[in-house]
Image (tube, rainbow, N blue to C red):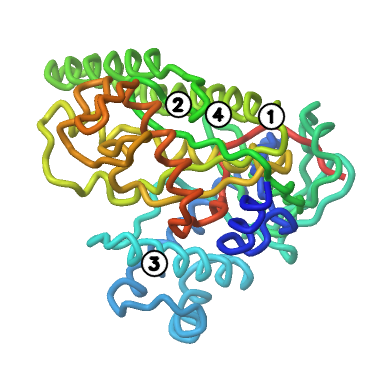
Amino acid sequence: MLFLLDLFKKYSYNIYEMEKEIVKTFKVKLNISPENREKLDKTLFEYNNLLNYLSSIAWDKKITNKVKLHHLTYYPAREKFNLPAQFVCSARDVVCDRMRAIIKRKRKSKPQFKKPFLRYDVRTITFKEGYCSLSTSFGRIKTKIIPYDYLNQHKDWTLTNTPTLIKRNKDFYLCLHFKKTVVLKEPSILIGVDLGIKNISVTSDNKFFSGGYLTYKSNHFFRLRKALQAKGTPSAKRVLKRISGREKRFKLDYLHQKSKELVQYVSELQNPCIVFEKLQGIREQKSKGRKMNRKLSTWTFRKFQELVTYKANQIGVPVAFVDARYTSQKCSRCGNILKSQRTGNTFKCKACGFELNADLNGARNIRKNFTEGQAPQVGLSVNQPLSSAFVTTS
């Protein structure tokens, strides 16, 4: 496997020796007394108003630099809002981060903060065993953390210093970010993975992971929303509100299951490396018809890649990315490229006559592109992995 090692040395900066930091988010429920609930509610409301105030100024003046926004808004914000000084600083950081994201994605509207939250730091929150102390507009409050057994699997992880307080259905939660540094293993087997709608993933060694149930449920939610919106009655609007978020939660749970299955399968191989194709900009392509455009707009490939990446990295399996061009049009045997060679789920080469499942052919091309040295990108930055659980802190 010397050629694989040379390949990784050339493109991945010694991936098999590289240390990678993994960040996971855990949602911890807080047991808060009624009088402290009112204090937190008012603090969240004031902080949300502060975020939108800073957002308007940053958007009008096109400011993404935290120092510039601080000098421009710190004292006016302190006078205008009843919040501790450190909350003004944390709100400034949140707004600047959101501004950079909007500019990067070429959005044309200013960032708006509708759902209240509050970002804490080491100065505004302290932890003791089973408890935490939170800063509010009315001084410090002490609250109990409701324990959960999932912590037992993460005793060796380190708590970062930027927890976020949120409120969901009259309950308060802390989103705690834990990190751990892992060493990625030296790879000896490459597994190309093609992502699709009918098959959520197909590996280059002939393993298929169906996405049929996800497609069925997505179509169900689409028809349900369409019918309720067309009806437009107060009762229909109440149903729309009640089912709000249900599809998102279902998709996330389903993607967690399928990504876990893929990582579990790959981990049974000897020192594997997962290779994905880079699919950025796929939704900006020219129109493919109303039905196909809707499928592409709801295709969850990015979240699936993120989930697989952090789950694989957590057990030391590296993940790489290669160019996606022509992977569905190229013959994985002879390399002939022709768009008409793929018909539905079947690929048939018009040069050598090779016939294969189209997704499997794509997965083999992804692996082949990597081995032929098409400058891959190793690792995916996962700042907010889509994982949540209840934990205790100590």
Q: Does the residue at mark 1 contact the one at mark 2 (Cβ under 8 Å)?
A: no
The answer to which of marks 4 and 1 sits earlier in the sequence is: 4
Residue underneath mark 4: 259
Type of amino acid under label 1: Leu
The answer to which of marks 3 and 4 sits earlier in the sequence is: 3
Residue at 48% across, 30% down: 204
Q: Quadrant of residue 7?
A: bottom right
Q: Position of residue 42 (x, y in %)?
A: 54, 51
The answer to which of marks 1 and 3 sits earlier in the sequence is: 3
Residue 269's disc number:
1
- In front here: 268 or 217? 268
Q: Does the residue at mark 4 contact the one at mark 1 (Cβ under 8 Å)?
A: no
Q: Does the residue at mark 3 contact the one at mark 4 (Cβ under 8 Å)?
A: no
Q: Residues within 10 Å of mark 2 (few under 14, many from 20)?
A: many
- Say what secondary structure mark 2 lies in: strand
Type of amino acid under label 4: Ser
Q: Position of residue 378 (x, y in %)?
A: 55, 55
Type of amino acid under label 3: Met
Residue at 33% across, 25% down: 197
Residue underneath mark 3: 99
- In front here: 213 or 246? 213
Residue at 28% across, 51% down: 281
Q: Is residue 51 above or below residue 68?
A: above
Q: Nearer the viewer, mark 4 or mark 1?
A: 1
Residue at 45% across, 26% down: 202
